[in-house]
Amino acid sequence: MFDVRQTSVDEHVPAGGLHHPDPAEIDLPSLLHSLSDPVRLEIVRSLAVADEGCLACKEVPLPVSKATASHHFKVLRLAGVIRQHDEGTRRISELRRDDLEQRFPGLLESVLRAAQTNELAPSGS
Amino acid sequence: MFDVRQTSVDEHVPAGGLHHPDPAEIDLPSLLHSLSDPVRLEIVRSLAVADEGCLACKEVPLPVSKATASHHFKVLRLAGVIRQHDEGTRRISELRRDDLEQRFPGLLESVLRAAQTNELAPSGS
């Protein structure tokens, strides 16, 4: 009924496929590392408030080159934070909210709240 | 009433003093980076369950050299995760639970819960 090999026959996925770790494989140090960069936090925040929960890479305004942005998206995907698929020439990303909630309850939401606080008051008392 | 320079006259502190960021200066990317290492997560877990909330560095069993362990404690201190002071030849560390809760509510606790989950089931199913 459920074929774990389905990604290998998905016509939108390039040869080799886009790797996404299973929820049980999501590793806490790797996850925290993926979230420890301001640009990647901004990607996660943008996806969290996106209208349909997903965005094309180019729809997230970032102060870095296209190649650097692609790298950051990839780090997030390999850490299990986002899921990506291709639609024509656009690579669409969405947060793996349910998978992360299942693996580490409350963690993503507390990071999203913290990201908002960090933005509002990075210094001062 | 509150003298921010008080650390400079603390007799236990070496010349220059041990730097601890103010709560408002704790930066989310730096905080997450400090927690994105298995050894540093183990230090944080050990401090979280320590009898009096604090431990000497040498009381935390770690699979690394003394110099490497000192480096990891320092990364945690500079990120605002732990507070350290010297007692004779022992450097004592404690989690800055209240400061972190004030700065980023719920974040440290969700990381501690996640660290326990990560330990229990890093792979499988």
Image (spheres, coloured by chain):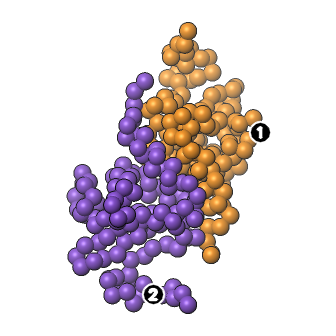
Chain colours: A orange, B purple
The quarter of the picture where the C terminus of chain A appears is bottom right
Q: Give percent across and percent down for residue A13.
A: 58, 23
Q: Give percent across and percent down for residue B5.
A: 48, 87
* Quarter of the rendering containing residue B12: bottom left
Kindly identify which residue carries mark 1: A51
CA separation in Å, label 1 and label 2 = 50 Å
The chain that hosts pointer 2 is B
The residue lying furthest to the front in this view is B51
* Quarter of the rendering containing residue B88: bottom left
The chain that hosts pointer 1 is A
Element type at marker 1? Answer: loop
Element type at marker 2? Answer: helix
Residue B81 is left or right of residue A84, and the answer is: left
The residue shown at (62%, 75%) is A124
Q: Give percent across and percent down for residue B49.
A: 36, 55
- Mark nearer the viewer, 1 or 2: 2
Kindly identify which residue carries mark 2: B6
The residue shown at (44%, 68%) is B78
Which label was assigned to residue B57? Answer: none
The residue shown at (70%, 36%) is A54
- Mark 1: few/some/many CA within 10 Å (<14, 14-19, 20+): few
Q: Give percent across and percent down for residue A114.
A: 61, 56
Residue A125 is left or right of residue B57, and the answer is: right
Question: Can residue A20 be spotted in the picture?
Answer: yes
Amino acid carrying mark 1 in the image = Asp
